[in-house]
Amino acid sequence: MNASTRQARHTIRTRTRTQRAASRIHRRGNASLTTHCLAAGLTPKEARTVANSLRRNAAKLGIQGTPARTHAAGRMRDSMRYTPAQVAQVAVVYRPRKAAFKDAAARLALAA
């Protein structure tokens, strides 16, 4: 596989992941913070990092999502789902240092 094919496949994979997350949020009306971050264009590892920071800021603001059950890794676990408006409120308070996280925070704040 040459470099241009590898880059093209990476681009398609990234677009697909972002679009799938955005479609899920649009369809359900709410989603986990990680899904919101994926829809903002972050990689899964970065999305988990930003979601944890957003979770802390949501707790500071007193914003509570809707409780939900998630099937992950062969078991059920509790999770919280947030609307785009709730995520926008939390993203305004979030102060990232990394440039990619700053871009994602701006997209999350505008998503509502």
Image (spheres, helix red, strand yellow):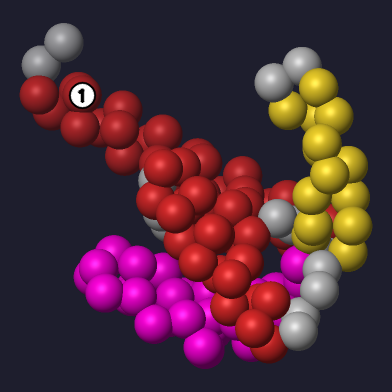
Q: Residues within 10 Å of mark 1 (few under 14, many from 20)?
A: few
Q: Is residue 68 left or right of residue 44?
A: right
Residue toward you, 41 or 33: 33
The residue located at (84%, 44%) in the rendering is: 78
Secondary-structure class at tag 1 = helix
Residue at the top extreme? 1
Residue 85 visible (yes or no): no
Quadrant housing residue 103: bottom left
Is 89 located above or below residue 17 in the figure? below
The residue located at (54%, 59%) in the rendering is: 52
The residue located at (30%, 33%) in the rendering is: 10
Is 33 located above or below residue 14 in the figure? below
Is 77 located above or below residue 36 in the figure? above
Percent x, y for residue 35?
62, 52
Range of residues picked out in magenta: 82-110
Please state, as top left, top right, bottom left or bottom right, where the C terminus lies in the image: bottom right
Please state, as top left, top right, bottom left or bottom right, where the N terminus lies in the image: top left
Percent x, y for residue 15?
44, 45
Pointer 1 residue: 6
Does the magenta portion include 22?
Answer: no
**Type of amino acid at the residue the image marks with label 1:** Arg
The residue located at (79%, 49%) in the rendering is: 79
Does the magenta portion include 86?
Answer: yes
